[in-house]
Amino acid sequence: MAMKLVMLLIMVRLVYGELNAVDEGLKSERFVYEEQLLKKVIRMEFKMEQMEREMLQTHDKMTSTLQNLTLEIENKTTELKLVEERVSLPMVAFNAYSLTDYSLDTNQILIFRNTYLNEGNGYDNVLGLFTAPVAGLYMFSMHACNYGGRGFYYYIVVDNSIIAQSTKYNNVQTDCASVVTLTKLKKDQRVWVKCASGSSSSQLSDTSYRQSTFSGVLLRG
Ligand SMILES: *[C@@H]1O[C@H](CO)[C@@H](O)[C@H](O)[C@H]1NC(C)=O
Ligand SMILES: *[C@@H]1O[C@H](CO)[C@@H](O)[C@H](O)[C@H]1NC(C)=O
């Protein structure tokens, strides 16, 4: 009987010990699992932080690109407007002939009574003045014809400032010569030709073989 009891006790202890071991095993398995989970969570957090950083960088880059593009578009729009203005420039050109006076005094304005062309109505054939209807780059030319032995001294002026000066003189031949000049004008600035040195005899002459003219054209705005 006592022997049986001892055996039972031993068995109980064995089973108990085994159960304990299983429990321990379970505990360590759980610990490993939890540890792995924790590592995973940490890795994910790290990755998410990295992603967040990358997203912020991408966002900053996109914002900068967008700002640059906006500036570029604004720049191109302004340039397009300038080009449009240039393309839509009015036609401005005149070609005037037939002087009202051939014996000019010093500083007398040459007045051409007729025009072959007066696009934009810039040339005033009563006062002899060209008034720029728009600002821009202009070209002007005075074609002077006279008899041999006669001199004609003249200026092309913008609001009284000389922009071209020339002399037409040939000792023998009756002939013509021109001066051509370029100038930038503001709207409403005026241009004319004036005699630089007066004389009581005629300095210029027009016949069927030659003709003095004053002409001008707007090249670009
Ligand atoms: C935007 O323009 C600035 C200045 O020109 C430049 O430094 C920057 O790199 C540009 N950004 C992008 C995203 O192109
Ligand atoms: C547009 O940008 C170019 C180059 O930066 C510059 O030279 C030009 O003046 C700009 N145009 C306008 C209308 O701002």
Image (cartoon, grey):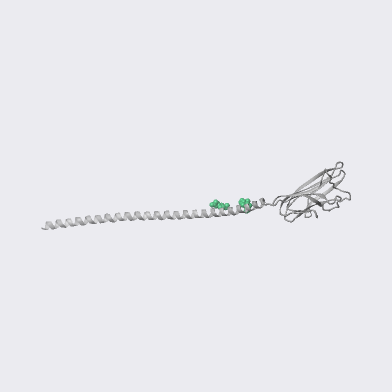
Residue 146, compared with residue 35, is above or below; it is above
Residue under the point 11% across and 58% down: 2
Residue under the point 42% across and 53% down: 47
Who is closer to the viewer here, 67 or 178? 178
Q: Position of residue 55 (x, y in %)?
A: 47, 54
Residue lying farthest right?
200
Q: Position of residue 59 (x, y in %)?
A: 50, 55
Residue under the point 58% across and 53% down: 73
Total numbered circles? 0
Q: Is residue 194 left or right of residue 32?
A: right
Residue under the point 27% across and 55% down: 26
Residue lying farthest top?
172
Q: Position of residue 31 (x, y in %)?
A: 31, 56
In the picture, which quadrant includes the N terminus?
Answer: bottom left
Q: Is residue 81 left or right of residue 28?
A: right
Who is closer to the viewer here, 187 or 164? 187
Who is closer to the viewer here, 74 or 220? 220
Q: Position of residue 7 (x, y in %)?
A: 14, 56
Q: Could you say which quadrant of the image residue 177 lies in?
A: top right
